[in-house]
Image (spheres, grey):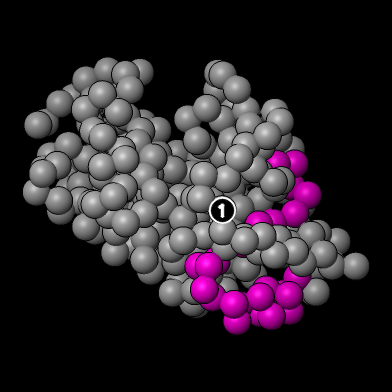
Amino acid sequence: MTKLSIRPAAAGRRRLGTAVLALAAAALSLSACGADPAAETVATAGTAGAEPTTASAAPVDAPSETADAGTGAITADGCLLVNERGDLVWDGAMTSELQALADRLNEAVAAAPDQFTGTALCAHYEGVVVFVKEDSTEVSEQVAAIASAHSAFPVTVSAVGASLTDLEAAMRTAMELPGYAGMFSGAGPDPRTGGLVISVRMQDVEADPGEVVDAAALAAELGVPVRLTATGEGSRY
């Protein structure tokens, strides 16, 4: 039987437990002109460290190999697992049936980016989470119809504060903010939080980008949650 559960938006949702995970979301990222890919970017469309491209909602395949969980604690958010940097990590391999379900859901995201935010595979490829804008109640029926054709896997609908369209607008704004000129090499969506991952140019990629950019102030300016990562391109500001 297909399991379709609804999870309401929860700002600052608590993370519990430990383990590993995978992401399959609609691809959407922006990079500064001439910039190299960020050293630690949001894992969009199921590809950890995917190279930023011009804004696009076209999904790509999810990973099929075990991810490097990195160092430090791995925390849980429902069936999703996250490393200490906020990156989704995974363990296991994709099955063809789960891939088909993820593809169908990603098609729905691409077709209605003003209502959907993205999708994520559960930690051990046992299901899918679909992120929707919190006021998009009509999409639940659509998701249920897709899930019913792939009843071997549970599908959870999780409400977040922004749609993919909202995040696209916030990404463009972030890359054009005059107060941060030259500081960012790229930006991408973080469907799990309904926010953005923004790559900050740093001399030392191991350094904390929060030392040069106030993430809370930037989030307030953009109106969406912000997670910062470092890209090793040297300082240009």
Q: Amino acid at mark 1?
A: Ala
Q: Residue at x 66, y 60 (%)?
A: 7
Relative side of 89 to 4, left or right: left
User: How many other residues sit within 10 Å of disc 1, few (<14), some (14-19) or many (≥20)?
Assistant: few
Q: Residue at x 27, y 54 (%)?
A: 222
Relative side of 71 to 168, left or right: right
Say which quarter of the image contains residue 128: bottom right
Q: Is residue 198 magenta?
A: no
Q: Position of residue 163 (x, y in %)?
A: 44, 66
Q: Is residue 138 magenta?
A: yes
Relative side of 142 to 170, left or right: right
The residue beneath circle 1 is 10
Q: Position of residue 13 (x, y in %)?
A: 57, 45
Q: Position of residue 14 (x, y in %)?
A: 60, 40
Q: Residue at x 64, y 43 (%)?
A: 77
Q: Is residue 220 above or below residue 131?
A: above
What range of the chain is rendered magenta?
123-147
Relative side of 180 to 121, left or right: left
Q: Position of residue 54 (x, y in %)?
A: 29, 58
Q: Is residue 138 above or below residue 164?
A: below
Can the viewer see residue 44 in this picture? Answer: no
